[in-house]
Amino acid sequence: MPLEKEVLKRLTTLVNSFGLSMIAVCEKLSIGISFNKGEVCVGVNAPGSRVATLISIYGEGAHGTLSIFMSEKCFASFVHTMTGGMIAPDPEDPVALSVAGEVSNMVSGNALTSLFERGYSGLDITPPQILTGSNIKTLRLPEDTGYTFTLPFLVEGDADRAIYLVLLFRR
């Protein structure tokens, strides 16, 4: 079923805002990141993920989730940068994991500010949930009628340091 023009416009604005926010946050942290445009996909595709965060987005104009999936090496890059090397990047350490939650908060906050400037008022987010494990996956439920997109990024151009922004917006 083709998307209505207004729905497509809204999805494009939402996806672009979050993708650009990821880049802006990494630039502020002096983390070199590149958008892997050739690997963008509908659905979820975040292979090799070791740490993930999940934030709900709700309010006027949008309802969905932002998930950030990180490989272990990507997670280590963020922990090292954001703590000045003071904390070991152990995916089992709650303090180190809080870095992933903070990255999610920064990306979400930056995106919501951008969306507000474009007329999307009344949007809010929940605190992040943080997940860790080997090869974390997310499964789409049959009753989920949203639109899901995976935006892949590489830290310093290294495929072993992948970070995936997964966006789900409900109809």
Image (cartoon, rainbow, N blue to C red):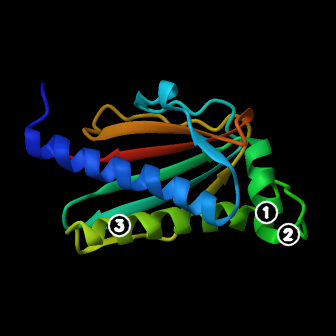
Q: Does 158 sit above or below residue 20? A: above
Mark 1 residue element:
helix
143, 99: nearer the viewer: 99
Q: Residue 102, position in %: x, y?
A: 62, 68
20, 108: nearer the viewer: 20
Q: Residue 42, position in %: x, y?
A: 38, 29
144, 98: nearer the viewer: 98
Contact? badges 3 and 2 (CB < 8 Å): no
The amino acid type of the residue labelled 1 equals: Thr
Label 3, label 1: how far apart the Cα atoms are: 25 Å
Is 46 on the left-hand or right-hand side of 97?
left
* Residue at 53% across, 68% down: 105
Label 3, label 2: how far apart the Cα atoms are: 28 Å
Please rate how many residues cluster around mark 3, counting C-alpha atoms within 10 Å: few if below 14, some from 14 to 19, many from 20: some
* Residue at 68% across, 64% down: 29
* Residue at 45% across, 53% down: 20
Mark 3 residue element:
helix
* Residue at 39% across, 37% down: 149
The amino acid type of the residue labelled 3 equals: Ser
Q: Which circle marks residue 111 in the picture? A: none
**Which of marks 1 and 3 precedes in the sequence?**
1
Please rate how many residues cluster around mark 1, counting C-alpha atoms within 10 Å: few if below 14, some from 14 to 19, many from 20: some
Q: Which residue is mark 2?
A: 84
**Residue 82 sits in quarter:** bottom right
Residue 97 seen: yes
Q: Which circle marks residue 81 in the picture? A: 1
Q: Residue 59, position in %: x, y?
A: 25, 68
Contact? badges 2 and 1 (CB < 8 Å): yes
**Residue 164 sits in quarter:** top right
Q: Which residue is mark 3?
A: 114
